[in-house]
Image (tube, rainbow, N blue to C red):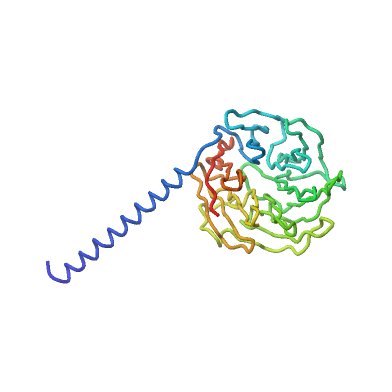
C-alpha cells in the first residue's frame, strides 16, 4: 500500500469509526429515553385530558366517551356520556370539572369529582351551536374559563374550513361568549401565570398563537407565538401535523403536544425551544399534565394517529427544569 492509499484508508476507517460511534450514541440515547418512559395506563381509546389532582390521575377517552380516574392501583370510569367525544378537561376553582365534548356540534359539561353531570352548554350566548366541536378548556385564576372550538374533522380527514373560535365564561357566569374567531382548527389552550397572555394551538398550520387578556376577559393583540416547523423537523408530511393540547408551568414555560410528531415541546415565554421530549409510545401525542411539584409529566399518546380507534396509553416521564 503506497503512502497516499495508506492515509486514504486511515481516513476511511476513522470516518467509519465516527459513524459507528454516532449510531451507537443515538441508539443508547433512544434506549435511555425509553427507559425513563413508564406506562401508567394502557389499552385506552382516544386518550386525552390528563389532570393530576390530589394524587390521582384523571383522563378521558374521545373514542370510549369516558372520564376515568387512576389512583395508582386501579382505574375507575367516572363518566360515560355517549356521543360526547370526551376531550379537554379542566379543574375549576370549585373542584368540579369542565369537560369538552369534541363530537360535532359539541358541548361543554360541568361534572363533579365523581363524574356526575351538573350543567351542560350546547350553544354560546347568542344561541350559536358549537359547530366543529369543543376541543380544550382552561380555567383562569379568577374562576373564569376559555374554551376552543375546533372545526369539521371528516373521514378521511381533510381540513375543510377555518371556523375555529375561542369562547369565554366569566367568573360566576352562565353563558359562554365568543371572543375570537377565524382560527385554523383551534386546539390546545393555556394561560400564563400572570394571567395576561392566552396561548392557543392552531393544529392546521403547525402554529401557536398568543393573545393579550383584557380585564373583562376579552382578547386583543393576536399574534403568532411559535411556528413548530421552525423549531423541530416535521416527522411526517400531513395537514394534521401540529400542536395539540398544552400546559403551562409555574415559570410560564409552555409544554405542547405535537399530534403526528410523537413529542412534547417545551417553549419559553419568549418562544425559544428549551427541550424536546421524544415519546416512544406513539406518534399521536395529544396532551400533557404535571405531576407533583412539576417534577414529572404525564403524557397521553395514541400509538398510530391514523388508527380510527385511536388506541393508546398514558406514560410518565421525568421533567427537565
Q: Position of residue 21 (x, y in %)?
A: 32, 56
Judged left or right of residue 106, residue 232 is left
Q: In terms of depth relative to the viewer, which is nearer, 235 or 270?
A: 270
Where, by quadrant of the figure, is residue 219 drawn?
Answer: bottom right
Q: Position of residue 32 (x, y in %)?
A: 42, 47
Q: Which residue is at a point 81% across and 52% down the rendered structure image? A: 178
Q: Position of residue 201 (x, y in %)?
A: 66, 54
In the picture as drawn, the residue positioned furthest to the bottom comes out as: 4
Count of all numbered marks drawn on residues in the image: 0
Q: In terms of depth relative to the viewer, which is nearer, 239 or 135?
A: 135
Q: Which residue is at a point 55% across and 48% down the rendered structure image? A: 260
In the picture as drawn, the residue positioned furthest to the left comes out as: 1
Where, by quadrant of the figure, is residue 226 drawn?
Answer: bottom right
Question: Would residue 321 be seen by someone viewing this image from the given angle?
Answer: yes
Q: In terms of depth relative to the viewer, which is nearer, 46 or 117?
A: 117
Judged left or right of residue 229, residue 211 is right
Judged left or right of residue 95, residue 242 is left
Q: Position of residue 83 (x, y in %)?
A: 72, 33
On-image quarter of the C terminus? bottom right
Q: Is residue 178 above or below residue 51?
A: below
Question: Would residue 287 be seen by someone viewing this image from the given angle?
Answer: no
Q: Is residue 105 above or below residue 228?
A: above
On-image quarter of the N terminus? bottom left
Q: Which residue is at a point 81% across and 43% down the rendered structure image? A: 129
Judged left or right of residue 130, residue 258 is left
Amino acid at each position: 500500500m503506497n503512502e497516499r492509499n495508506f492515509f486514504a484508508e486511515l481516513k476511511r476507517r476513522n470516518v467509519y469509526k465516527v459513524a459507528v460511534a454516532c449510531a451507537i450514541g443515538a441508539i443508547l440515547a433512544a434506549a435511555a429515553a425509553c427507559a425513563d418512559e413508564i406506562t401508567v395506563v394502557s389499552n385506552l381509546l382516544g386518550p386525552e385530558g390528563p389532570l393530576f389532582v390530589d394524587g390521582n390521575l384523571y383522563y378521558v377517552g374521545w373514542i370510549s366517551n369516558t372520564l376515568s380516574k387512576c389512583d395508582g392501583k386501579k382505574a375507575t370510569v367516572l363518566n360515560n356520556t355517549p356521543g360526547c367525544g370526551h376531550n379537554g378537561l379542566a379543574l375549576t376553582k370549585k373542584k368540579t370539572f369542565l369537560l369538552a365534548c369534541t363530537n360535532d356540534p359539541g358541548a361543554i359539561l360541568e361534572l363533579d369529582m365523581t363524574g356526575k353531570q351538573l350543567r351542560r352548554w350546547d350553544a354560546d350566548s347568542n344561541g350559536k351551536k358549537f359547530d366543529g366541536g369543543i376541543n380544550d378548556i382552561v380555567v383562569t385564576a379568577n374562576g373564569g374559563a376559555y374554551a376552543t372550538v375546533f372545526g369539521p374533522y371528516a373521514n378521511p380527514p381533510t381540513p375543510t374550513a377555518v371556523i375555529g373560535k375561542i369562547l369565554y365564561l366569566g367568573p360566576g357566569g352562565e353563558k359562554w361568549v365568543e371572543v375570537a374567531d377565524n382560527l385554523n382548527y383551534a386546539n390546545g389552550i393555556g394561560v400564563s401565570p400572570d394571567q395576561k397572555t392566552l396561548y392557543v394551538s392552531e393544529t392546521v398550520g403547525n402554529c401557536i398563537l398568543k393573545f393579550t387578556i383584557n380585564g373583562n376577559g376579552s382578547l386583543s393583540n393576536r399574534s403568532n407565538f411559535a411556528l413548530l416547523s421552525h423549531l423541530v423537523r416535521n416527522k411526517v408530511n400531513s395537514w394534521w401535523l401540529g400542536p395539540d393540547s398544552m400546559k403551562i408551568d409555574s415559570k410560564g414555560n409552555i409544554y405542547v403536544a405535537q399530534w403526528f410528531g410523537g413529542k412534547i415541546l417545551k417553549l419559553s415565554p419568549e418562544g425559544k425551544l428549551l427541550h424536546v421530549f421524544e415519546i416512544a409510545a406513539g406518534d399521536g401525542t395529544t396532551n400533557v399534565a404535571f405531576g407533583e411539584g412539576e417534577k414529572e409529566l404525564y403524557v397521553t399518546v395514541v400509538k398510530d394517529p391514523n388508527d380510527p380507534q385511536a388506541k393508546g396509553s398514558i406514560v410518565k416521564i421525568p421533567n427537565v427544569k
